[in-house]
Image: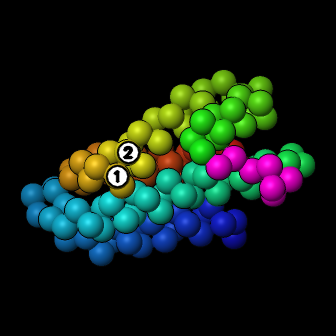
Amino acid sequence: MSEAIRYFNNAKDILNNAKIEDNRYVDIKYVQEACGTAYLAVLKAINEFLLKKGVLKKEMPRSVEAYRKALQKYLIIHNGKLLKEFDDLYHELHIAGYYAGDLRHVDTVKTIFKATKVFIDKVK
């Protein structure tokens, strides 16, 4: 199992601990933690792809801007939508979900997690 999938599965497990009432998460802490872990899964998927392409560990991206540049250099030739999808996941998982704690509706989080899995599968 890849690190990206392991992290993604961990994110789903964390989210399963969150209590739900009226299709909303009651304790945002679990949602934030799950979103942060899911975003790390996205980064792990990109890192795994870059390592397969011969990028050295010491040259791995260390910022969101560096990840965007790596996607432009190595992945967009395979799928031009990946950069937009990465940006969406950055804003949804990392900013709204983890940092701001703004995701409360169960259906919204499920949709974002589905998009996360699709992205990870595309990057493999």
Q: Determine crowd level at label 2: few under 14, some 14-19, many 20+ residues with C-alpha closer than 10 A.
A: some
Say if 49 sits above or below 17 in the image.
above
Q: Residue at x 61, y 52 (%)?
A: 43
Query: Which is nearer the eye, 14 or 67?
Result: 67
- Left or right for 92, reference 78: left
Q: Residue at x 30, y 68 (%)?
A: 30
Q: Determine crowd level at label 1: few under 14, some 14-19, many 20+ residues with C-alpha closer than 10 A.
A: some
Check the picture and name the quadrant holding the N terminus. bottom right
Q: Position of residue 53 (x, y in %)?
A: 86, 46
The reply to whether dot 2 and dot 1 touch (C-beta < 8 Å) is yes
Q: Which residue is mark 1?
A: 99
Q: Quadrant of residue 31?
A: bottom left
Q: Which residue appears farthest toward the left when viewing the image?
A: 22
Query: Which is nearer the eye, 23 or 14?
Result: 14
Q: Position of residue 101 (x, y in %)?
A: 26, 53
Say if 67 sits above or below 121 in the image.
above
- Left or right for 102, reference 95: left
- Left or right for 88, reference 3: left
Type of the residue with mark 1: Tyr
Q: Which residue is mark 2?
A: 95
Q: Quadrant of residue 48?
A: bottom right
Query: Which segment is the magenta one?
Result: 56-62
Q: Which residue appears farthest toward the right when viewing the image?
A: 54
Mark 1: which secondary structure? Answer: helix
